[in-house]
Amino acid sequence: MLLNPRQQEAVRAITGPVLVLAGAGSGKTRVITEKIAHLITRCGYPAKHIAAVTFTNKAAKEMKERVGQTLGREYTRGLTVSTFHTLGLTIIKKEVTQLNMKAGFSLFDDQDSLALLNALTEPELDGDKELLKRLQHKIGQWKNAMLLPDQALAQAQTDDDKLFAEFYRRYQQNMRACNALDFDDLILLPTLLLRTNEAVRQRWQQKFQYLLVDEYQDTNTSQYELVRLLVGDQANFTVVGDDDQSIYSWRGAQPQNLALLQRDFPQLQVIKLEQNYRSHGRILKAANILIENNPHVFEKKLFSEMEYGVPLRVIYGRNEEHEAERVVAEIVRRRFLERTPYSQFALLYRGNHQARIFEKALIANRIPYRMTGGQSFFARAEIKDMMAYLRLLVNPTDDTAFIRIINCPKRGIGPNTVERIGELAHELHTGLLEAANHQALKTRLGAREFQSVQYFCQLIQRCARRCDHQPEAASALFDLLKTIGYEEWLYETSPSVSAAEMRWKNINELMRWVSDMLKGDAEHEPLSLADTVAKLCLRDMMSRQEEAEQGDQVQLMTLHASKGLEFPHVFMVGMEEGLLPHQSSIDENMVEEERRLAYVGITRAQQSLTFTMAKERRQYGDTLRPEPSRFLFELPQDDLEWEEQTIATEAQQEQTRLSGIALLRKAMED
Ligand SMILES: Nc1ncnc2c1ncn2[C@@H]1O[C@H](COP(=O)(O)OP(=O)(O)OP(=O)(O)O)[C@@H](O)[C@H]1O
Ligand SMILES: [Mg+2]
């Protein structure tokens, strides 16, 4: 595959800042991978001085593989291809002392930080979930905008804002005390450090002499700042993006960052790509016409030399179950009549909660599928338990982890005991584990409780000591698992034997990862337990989306997660007012972002695109009769085939119901 002249121009522009601004499927990501290869082979950049930043772990992995295939692995050794957050973590780990942190810090996920906020806002918020979520979101916004608690307080207008800023201050203080970081800290901390510390800044500018960023439209203020600080005055970097695909403003992404670039780097070279290599003509046309309904800062054109293709379709189900059945029936039909592999189909939806019903229909028909996102491995209770043990082992001040496992498996330590420990910790200004281990506790607890607590502390300390000695770490962990009787406990507390087996299998999978990372292999250095845990926590936060091998499986994911990917056949399901656009966006007048989301979905499709909806949908016990999404009416109607909504068609639909399809499949298989 040859690059077109514009793409070549973008690849060859290696001095100064370059922005590639272009619509979906125009080969922006392609430019990034080709450019990395070009920098290494033609321009003499050692791979270790190049960093490429992408949006998901999956994209990072694919990018590294692609470059590796083009050049051979020996050339890409040391190349940094990662997400913004992983890059942040890398910097933090190297600069722990500069940041006044202790090694072995914990990474808090959303649940951990919510639990901490809950504790810190008693009695004011009184455990109000809604308010706590709002507070958490607000703190995230402040961090993404690089505002520290004092600045947040200074800017606060209303009393509510002031109260939230005060909670933010308490939260940061406590995170510090626990030696813990949250997701947003992974960007905020390195950015602040680079900004204030010249030596550190120079070190990292020296390390990353060329920087590339994919999906640039979704960077927020602190990420942009990180880019600016890393590239320095040399400003040798390439960013690629599409303002029409900006779908993360709720996380502080600023499409204006595209315009800011021009202001901050007057010498910026802007290259536009206009040929789409992904989608059939009709799909591209539909996408272009839809997005014209949004205001535009940048003019972009896109053409395709691919065939015009089949019309886009809109199909209905009587209700949500029927919608799912129809989608599955369609997939089975095409699998067996046209021999289309399952892996060529993708089901895209607005929210993860929509997936369950499709999963059910797929399982009922024994169709293999793969879900990206959704309930992640790391969200499972047993994995959270085990991770809490690991976290406490490497970071004795991780109080959230302590609280999770002090009585798990049950060892007769109740909330009262924990409260006593908490009081002592408060008096002594220590973490909970240290307080639990303090002799002063003896007079405050009953003899039995005191003994249980002592036993727990000794268990953790003994294991932590053994883990310090690298070669012994893995077996120390296995011993710990045995001593606490976790497996037996799973069998006692799970609703069924098969559930317990499943949970125990998950624990074993986690333990296998841990011991593999501790050991290292030909490509990866052995890691310390602290580094292993940090890595796992980060993977946790980014969700374990992408680990398993790709098989012949139908792909299920949210529209957000589909960014950057492409599939021959796409179903956009739940195309209804209230779902897409989402009700909250309709209420808040944020429909433009939803339209961009629809644009992202449509432009994933290469050959066929089907929209589906339910005529009736149950929601919180009510039955709704949703309207078709407004976006369907904005598409070019000549290219859209609406299924007739007559009784006769419903009868026809019945014929293609799954029973018939199952017979058909059987006939084909025989
Ligand atoms: N010059 C080219 N010739 C042929 N195919 C190309 C060319 N450039 C890119 N492609 C192919 O077009 C498809 C889209 O490319 P790519 O994913 O890089 O687009 P993109 O602009 O990053 O899209 P998105 O905005 O959705 O992230 C890929 O299958 C890619 O291999
Ligand atoms: Mg891309």
Image: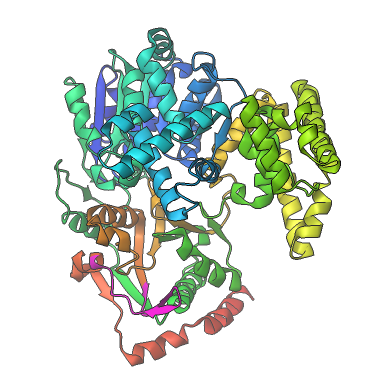
Between residues 611 and 118, which one lies in front from this camera angle?
Answer: 118
Of residue 514 and residue 619, the one placed in the foreground of this image is: 619
In the rendered view, would you say 500 is above or below 120? Answer: below
Q: Position of residue 117 (x, y in %)?
A: 50, 42
* Ligand number 2: quarter of image: top left
Front residue of 386 and 443: 443
Describe residue 643's horizontal placement relative to residue 454 as left or right: left
Whole-percent x, y for residue 124 in the image: 45, 46
Does the magenta portion include 219?
A: no
The quadrant in which residue 606 appears is: bottom left
User: Which quadrant of the structure image shows residue 646?
Assistant: bottom left
The residue lying at 70 percent from left, 46 percent from top is 416
Where residue 576 sits in the image (x, y, percent)? 32, 69
State the image coordinates of residue 265 (x, y, percent, origin top left).
20, 21
Compared to residue 333, the image places residue 114 above or below, namely above
Q: Quadrant of the C terminus?
A: bottom right
In the picture, measured across the screen, residue 247 lies left or right of residue 432, that is: left
- Above-or-below relation of 56 to 527: below
Residue 621 shown in magenta = yes
Q: In this rendering, does residue 430 appear at all?
A: no
| Residue 573 visible, this angle | yes
Residue 242, quarter of picture: top left
Question: Which residue in the rendered view is the most extreme toward the top?
Answer: 199
Label tally: 0
Q: Nearer the viewer, residue 282 or 434?
A: 434
Q: Quadrant of the N terminus?
A: top left
Name the side, left or right, on which 667 lies relative to 345.
right
- Give the farthest residue toward the front: 443
167 over 316 or under it: above or below: above
Describe the colour scheme in one phrase: rainbow
Residue displayed at 41% across by 55% down? 567
Magenta segment: 613-630
